[in-house]
Amino acid sequence: MIYSDLKTLSRALHEKRISSVELARLFLDRVTRLNPELNAFITVDEEKTIAAAKAADQRLAAGSAGMLTGIPLAEKDLFCAEGWLTTCGSKMLQNFVSPYDAAVVTKLEREAGMVSLGKVNMDEFAMGSSNETSWFGAVKNPWDKTCVPGGSSGGSAAAVAAYLAPVATGTDSGGSIRQPAAFCGLSGIKPTYGIVSRYGMVAFASSLDQGGVIAHSAEDCALVLSAMAGFDERDSTSLERPAEDYSRLLGQPLDGLKIGLPKEFFGEGANAEVVSAVLLVVEEYKRLGAKIVDVALPNSHLSVPVYYVIAPAEASSNLSRFDGLRYGYRAPDCNDLSEAYTKSRAEGFGAEVKRRIMIGTYVLSHGYYDAYYLKAQRVRRLIADDFRKAFRECDVILGPTSPTTAFNIGERTSDLVALYLSDIYTIAVNLAGLPGLSIPSGFDGQGLPIGLQLIGNYFDEARLLNVAHLYQQATDWHTRRPQGF
Ligand code: GLN
């Protein structure tokens, strides 16, 4: 049962072949047994999980259950959930029990009736690409426990890859859903900016952060995204659009679909095994009826430098609320207010977070604002314009998700530029606010998963998911399981 897709789980629950409580216990047992090897979960609370599963069983019995009712999930630990510890991977919030639910939690758990198995590990405040900046320690990749699972949604990806949860929530500001999905052989979607509410999602870089899903297949992503998205007046950047069923196009033939290949995504820097796996997928798409066209994204090489001005600027502002007074960690024995601020922040934040706060404060400061922040915003527009032009030539853009497969734990902790470059193909998508998806597309010589990225035009999630789905119908990469799990 634990290896089933969401539709199969749903059918079993509706036909009463298994109860939600039984299903939750199957996964909780695996979490107890296998999580110590992986460190994917930060918080497990069996009582809460079983209570939610019982409520789901009541809905199933009463006939008021939906498609996802009773299905377990893992929540990235930056979604506030009432009564649950919500740490954001930081010492700063290690004791923060949220008094309210994020919109995503309301929709998936309270409304759709999904059952939270717990809160999963992540890079501190979602800053990282390897899950090594977490105050709760690194997460291991189930495909090779000496490797990182990617980040920042590394706990989400490791939990799903090891079948500790059938699906997980994630967030993506520069690649944090797609890159860990790629490193762990999973499917992950970051939707168009503004379709998933950021209410109750601890903010890192507000103009880039977007909630999404990590699952085993594009079909599972579509089901959960449909329940997760929707207008929310509590988030001023939430888009007022009618609800959508993102599964509605699944199975439609691809005839005539134009897939754009940007040469910038296949140049130097991309590992040869990754490139050849991605090119094999292109061949498969041709067989499925797609046409391949060349597109250009001439400013995409500027996306990493632009991101590392804009994201820290927004982070420095967002993280000013952690002052040791209102919530979070407070340093002991402070003599006055200013000491309370400085000591609490110095002790509560890790090195990467401090680095970003310092860069952000610098680029926003008087005299540097025009030179850095404003300039970065201008280049951001150029990057978005490149996509606008490219989508005149094609329907979806295809390339690798990350230039390499999962790297070793510790390998890039002292080479930050190498670490930052693992998001070189994903960041531009956030800067433009477009939807992007990663699906597994093979393995390298060491047996590590390779990820393929599909980028869609604004609000084109349903088509994007179908393009991924048809590939998954024709191949079986997404059904492979890491040894020992
Ligand atoms: N890895 C990128 C960073 O460190 C992106 C993180 C994210 O998407 N949250 O900021």
Image: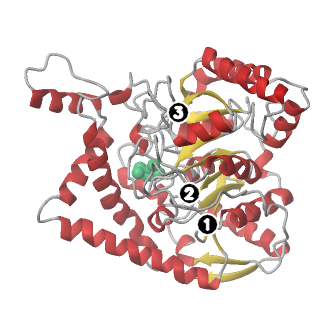
- Within 10 Å of disc 1 (Cα), the crowding (few <14, some 14-19, many 20+) is some
The disc, 2 or 3, on the residue closer to the chain's N-terminal end is: 3
Q: Position of residue 262 (x, y in %)?
A: 58, 76
Q: Is residue 362 left or right of residue 216?
A: left
Which quadrant: the C terminus? top right
- Within 10 Å of disc 2 (Cα), the crowding (few <14, some 14-19, many 20+) is many
* Quadrant position of residue 319: top left
Of the residues shown, which amino acid type is indicated by label 3? Val
Look at mark 3 in the image and give the residue it sits on.
Answer: 139
Q: Is residue 222 left or right of residue 77?
A: right
Element marked by disc 3: loop
Look at mark 2 in the image and give the residue it sits on.
Answer: 195
Report if residue 142 is visible in the image.
Answer: no
Using the numbered discs, state the Cα–Cα distance from disc 3 to disc 1 in whole angstroms.
33 Å
Position of residue 122 relative to residue 421, above or below, is above
Q: Position of residue 36 (x, y in %)?
A: 58, 21
Element marked by disc 1: loop
Q: Do callouts 1 and 2 mark residues in contact (Cβ within 8 Å)?
A: yes
Which quadrant: the N terminus? top right
Q: Which mark is nearer the camera, 2 or 3?
A: 2
Residue appearing at x 85%, y 62% in the figure:
251
Using the numbered discs, state the Cα–Cα distance from disc 1 to disc 2 in whole angstroms.
8 Å
Of the residues shown, which amino acid type is indicated by label 1? Phe
Element marked by disc 2: loop
The disc, 3 or 1, on the residue closer to the chain's N-terminal end is: 3
Look at mark 1 in the image and give the residue it sits on.
Answer: 459
Position of residue 140 relative to residue 49, above or below, is below
Mark 2 C-beta to ligand 1 under 8 Å: no
Residue appearing at x 38%, y 47% in the figure:
204
Q: Do callouts 2 and 3 mark residues in contact (Cβ within 8 Å)?
A: no
